[in-house]
């Protein structure tokens, strides 16, 4: 594999806003390069040693969601444009250690009650939803939906 195609180098290019990085790849390297990995690696940094570390960590996450994630799949046939979108994430405050953010687990196979609770409480963690499943009846969920105007038709 090319020295250019390793996550440490790719994140360095990401942080430094090297807009020509994708164009400089060979045809073979472009086939192996994944802009999708830029979302997963690029949105999370460890900046504890930086004087404004917490702000930088928050900035990366918010900026990645706003400038990159939002329209990523609508330009899926344009990998160079995806890379250019990725270079807008960094605040240009240096290079940081990026950490992997795993995608959310699929909700396939969930019970109707669990699906309803996830829809009602999207910010709850899996263990909190587990507790809610254990203490909430389907009747209570139906009543909540009725009061919220979400009755089944």
Image (cartoon, rainbow, N blue to C red):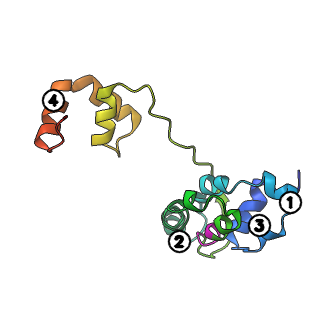
Q: Residues within 10 Å of mark 4 (few under 14, many from 20)?
A: few
Question: Mark 3 or 4, which is nearer the eye?
Answer: 3
Boundaries of the magenta span: 85-89
Do the residues bearing badges 1 and 4 touch, measured as CB atoms within 8 Å?
A: no
Q: Residues within 10 Å of mark 3 (few under 14, many from 20)?
A: many
The answer for how far apart the CA atoms under marks 2 and 3 are is 30 Å
Task: From the viewer's side, name the closer residue of 73 and 9.
Answer: 73
Label 4 to label 2: alpha-carbon separation: 46 Å
Residue picked out by circle 4: 140
Work out whether mark 4 precedes mark 2 in sequence or the reverse, and give the earlier one. 2
Q: Is residue 15 above or below residue 4?
A: below
Which type of secondary structure does the marked residue at label 3 adopt? helix
Q: CA distance from mark 3 to mark 1?
A: 10 Å
Residue at 56% across, 64% down = 68
> Dot 2 lies on which element?
loop
Q: Nearer the viewer, residue 76 or 7?
A: 76
Relative to 2, say whether 62 is above or below: below
Say which mark, if any, is on residue 22.
3
């Amino acid at each position: 594999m090319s020295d250019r195609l390793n996550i440490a180098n790719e994140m360095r290019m990401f942080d430094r806003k090297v807009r020509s990085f994708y164009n400089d790849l060979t045809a073979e390297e472009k086939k192996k390069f994944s802009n999708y990995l830029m979302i997963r690696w690029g949105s999370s940094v460890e900046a504890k040693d930086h004087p404004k570390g917490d702000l930088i960590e928050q900035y990366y996450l918010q900026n990645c969601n706003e400038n990159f994630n939002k329209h990523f799949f609508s330009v899926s046939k344009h990998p160079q444009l995806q890379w250019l979108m990725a270079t807008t994430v960094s605040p240009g405050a240096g290079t940081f250690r990026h950490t992997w953010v795993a995608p959310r687990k699929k909700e396939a196979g969930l019970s109707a009650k669990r699906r309803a609770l996830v829809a009602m409480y999207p910010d709850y963690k899996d263990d909190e939803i587990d507790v809610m499943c254990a203490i909430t009846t389907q009747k209570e969920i139906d009543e909540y939906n009725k009061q919220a105007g979400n009755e089944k038709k």
